[in-house]
Amino acid sequence: MLEVIIIITIIALDQITKYFTVKNLKTDGSFTVIKGFLEFCYVENRGAAFGILQNKRWFFIVLTIIICAGMAYYLFTYKDTRMILRISLAFILGGAIGNLIDRIRLGYVVDMIHIAAINYPVFNVADSFVVIGTILLAWYLLFIADK
């Protein structure tokens, strides 16, 4: 049950931030939070991470559905797994579904967070949870699994 709450919360946070980004930044440009460090801006990402594989919408939709189905099956079938594994999969699923909603509904993913200090590519809340979930999953696989 906790996993479902995490997934729904991540999707809601992601979609709410994207809604406000479109509403406030699509025509107005960017908003600086900390000068030279952090800003919010509107970006339409038609590719994957770092803008690779541009305009492969259906590829990403199908791939995301297949991967999410596999993770959801594992998450809801094997209830005896460790909590860190369950949370990592919930983070990845919530983020993936958040971006999937954009791809299906808009044809692209709305990104808005830009760390200007290192000129890091613009990303969104869903991306953040996918990355955090992947780091937790890697930690689990490297240091906890089979122990």
Image (cartoon, rainbow, N blue to C red):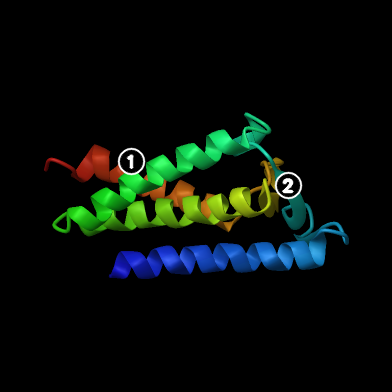
**Most foreground residue, 111 or 143:** 111
Determine whether, in the image, residue 7 is placed left or right of residue 19: left
Q: Which residue is labeled 2 in the image? A: 44
Q: Quadrant where the C terminus lies? A: top left
| Residue 125 to residue 57: above or below | below
Per the image, label 2 sits on a secondary structure element best described as strand
Residue at (41%, 53%) from the top-left corner? 93
In the displayed structure, does residue 6 sit left or right of residue 82? Answer: right
Q: Could you tell me which residue is drawn at 71 percent across and 68 percent down?
A: 20
Q: Amino acid under label 1?
A: Ala
Tell me the kind of residue under disc 2: Glu
Residue furthest toward the right? 28
The secondary element bearing badge 1 is classed as helix
Q: Earlier in the sequence, mark 1 or mark 2?
A: 2
Q: Position of residue 112 (x, y in %)?
A: 70, 55
Q: Position of residue 131 (x, y in %)?
A: 47, 47
Quadrant in the rendering for residue 66:
top left
Q: Specify whether 90 is left or right of 84.
A: right
Which of label 1 and label 2 is nearer to you?
2
**Which numbered tag is attached to residue 14?**
none
Return the residue at label 1: 138
Q: Identify which residue is drawn at 26% across, 54% down.
A: 75
- Residue 70's image quarter? top left
Give the Cα distance between marks 1 and 2.
29 Å
Task: Estimate the x, y position of residue 59 in percent, counting from the top left.
Answer: 54, 33
Q: Which quadrant: the N terminus?
A: bottom left
